[in-house]
Image (cartoon, rainbow, N blue to C red):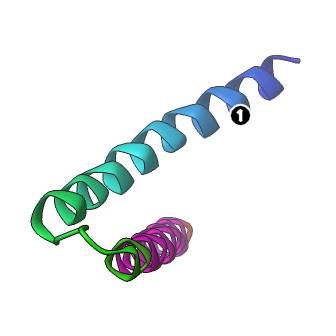
Amino acid sequence: MDNEKETTKQALDRMTLYDFLYVLPMFFLFFYFPSDRFWQVIVNFIIIILVGFGLAYATHTVVYLYNRSKYK
């Protein structure tokens, strides 16, 4: 049971980091890019989704490389 609580705590800590890294580009996009027209809002959402995929991929790659080098 304690292992499950620790895993949940680690997951929530990572989610907080992801949320922080994900919200900053989103605020920057909607502040910097115009959102007067509907297609501009759609382009901003597409960019936000791609940034999210990029952050997730980069984080998983860094964690994988760190774990691989730690256990060698």
Q: What type is the residue that disc 1 sits on?
A: Thr
Overall secondary structure of the magenta section = helix
Instruction: Describe the element under mark 1 as helix, strand or loop.
Output: helix
Q: How many marks?
A: 1
Q: Nearer the viewer, residue 54 or 30?
A: 30
Answer above or below: position of 15 versus 18: above
Q: Is residue 35 left or right of residue 55?
A: left
Indicate whether residue 60 is drawn in magenta: yes
Tell me what residue is drawn at x 49 percent, y 73 percent: 49
- At 58% across and 33% down in the image, what residue appears? 12
Determine the residue located farthest toward the top in the rendered image. 2
Q: Position of residue 58 (x, y in %)?
A: 42, 75
Residue at the disc numbered 1: 7
Q: Position of residue 16 (x, y in %)?
A: 45, 37
Q: Report the residue that reaches farthest toward the left.
A: 32
**57 or 69, which lies in front?**
57
As drawn, which residue projects farthest toward the front? 37
Q: Could you say which quadrant of the image residue 50 lies in?
A: bottom left
Q: Nearer the viewer, residue 20 or 1?
A: 20
Q: Is residue 46 above or below residue 36?
A: below
Question: Residue visible at 33% across and 49% down?
Answer: 23
Q: Is residue 19 above or below residue 16?
A: below
The quadrant holding residue 59 is: bottom left
- In the rendered image, the quadrant that contains the N terminus is top right
Residue stretch rendered in magenta on the structure: 43-70
Q: Residues within 10 Å of mark 1 (few under 14, many from 20)?
A: few
Q: Residue at x 49, y 65 (%)?
A: 63
